[in-house]
């Protein structure tokens, strides 16, 4: 175990303060000095404003969670907003980290994979099926240019499952956001790309098991632009987990 005095040498800035995920992360990063920011304090579309904000703060790590996600249809209806927040905003973050030598951790999605065969490894070819995934891959493109970075391709959801409908005939590898939060401190020094997810399950079965309300099923054939099998291979994560991470009662 790393001594707490060494942990506190890291000063971490986290975007997306108002997200549900950050509520967990505030607790799981309590051994570090953290600054959680929302779009009012830290406008990712303005490099100048971001640079002014970090001035004299000696940020060592930046975890970029903010962006446009749901509803998924917004990325089809408002392409400009999707490009601005998920591609251009991320590119600005990369430029900021490069200029100030800040370690960047970028939250992406497993939807960047084609979503046909499943069990995708980090090295597998990428081919998004919808605009949301394209926007996240656009963000990844700029992050890949900066070597002091880590891309997390996540299959993350809320606990309990919050949606009233779930897709039948499609598989995914959901992991709860609270579990991802617990893992995050142990990944701060990693680089490259890491898939993060749980067991391969049909989405409808997962929803029924982990929802506090009645969930109705939707046939995959009736859903547009959605991957049939977006399950991911988490071998690299498990290798790191088994070597470094000891979290009581933690399960994927």
Image: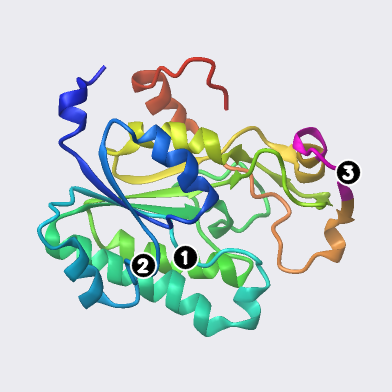
Q: Is residue 113 above or below residue 222?
A: above
Looking at marks 3 and 1 on the same chain, the residue that comes earlier in the sequence is marked by 1
For this orientation, the residue located farthest to the left is: 56
Residue shown at 69%/57% (left/top)? 227
The residue sitting at 51% across, 80% down in the picture is 81
**Where is residue 88 shown, x and y percent of the image?**
37, 76
Question: In the displayed structure, does residue 48 sit left or right of residue 93?
Answer: left
> Could you say which disc has been placed on residue 214 in the image?
3
| Whole-number angstrom distance, CA of label 3 to CA of label 2 | 37 Å
Residue 117, horizontal then vertical, whole percent = 67, 49
Q: Residue at x 16, y 28 (%)?
A: 6
From this view, report whether residue 172 is shown above or below residue 144.
above
Label 2 sits on a secondary structure element that is helix
Locate residue 185 relative to residue 11 in the image: left or right.
right
Which stretch is magenta?
208-216
Left or right: where does residue 181 sit relative to residue 101?
right
The numbered mark at residue 203 is none
- Callout in the foreground (3, 2): 3
Residue 67 circle label:
1
Within the image, what quadrant is residue 133 found in?
bottom right
The disc at residue 90 is 2
Quarter of the figure with residue 242: top left
Out of 170 and 69, give the one closest to the viewer.
Answer: 69
| Residue 80 magenta-highlighted | no
């Amino acid at each position: 175990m790393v001594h707490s005095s060494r942990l506190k040498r890291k000063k971490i800035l986290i975007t997306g303060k108002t997200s549900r995920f950050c509520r967990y992360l505030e607790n799981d990063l309590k051994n570090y000095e953290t600054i959680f920011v929302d779009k009012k304090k830290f406008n990712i579309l303005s490099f100048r404003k971001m640079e002014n904000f970090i001035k004299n703060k000696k940020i060592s790590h930046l975890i970029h969670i903010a962006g446009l996600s749901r509803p998924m249809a917004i990325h089809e209806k408002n392409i400009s907003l999707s490009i601005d927040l998920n591609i251009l905003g991320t590119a600005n973050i990369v430029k900021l980290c490069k200029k100030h030598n800040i370690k960047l951790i970028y939250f992406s999605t497993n939807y960047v994979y084609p979503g046909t065969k499943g069990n995708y490894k980090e090295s597998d070819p990428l081919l998004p099926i919808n605009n949301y995934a394209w926007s996240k891959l656009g963000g990844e493109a700029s992050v890949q240019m900066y070597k002091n970075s880590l891309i997390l391709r996540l299959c993350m959801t809320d606990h309990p499952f919050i949606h009233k409908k779930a897709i039948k005939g499609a598989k995914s590898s959901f992991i709860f956001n609270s579990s991802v939060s617990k893992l995050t401190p142990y990944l701060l020094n990693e680089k490259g790309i890491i898939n993060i997810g749980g067991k391969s399950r049909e989405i409808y079965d997962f929803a029924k098991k982990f929802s506090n309300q009645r969930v109705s099923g939707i046939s995959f054939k009736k859903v547009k632009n959605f991957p049939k099998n977006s399950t991911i291979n988490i071998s690299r994560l498990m290798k790191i987990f088994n070597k470094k991470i000891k979290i009581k009662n933690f399960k994927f």
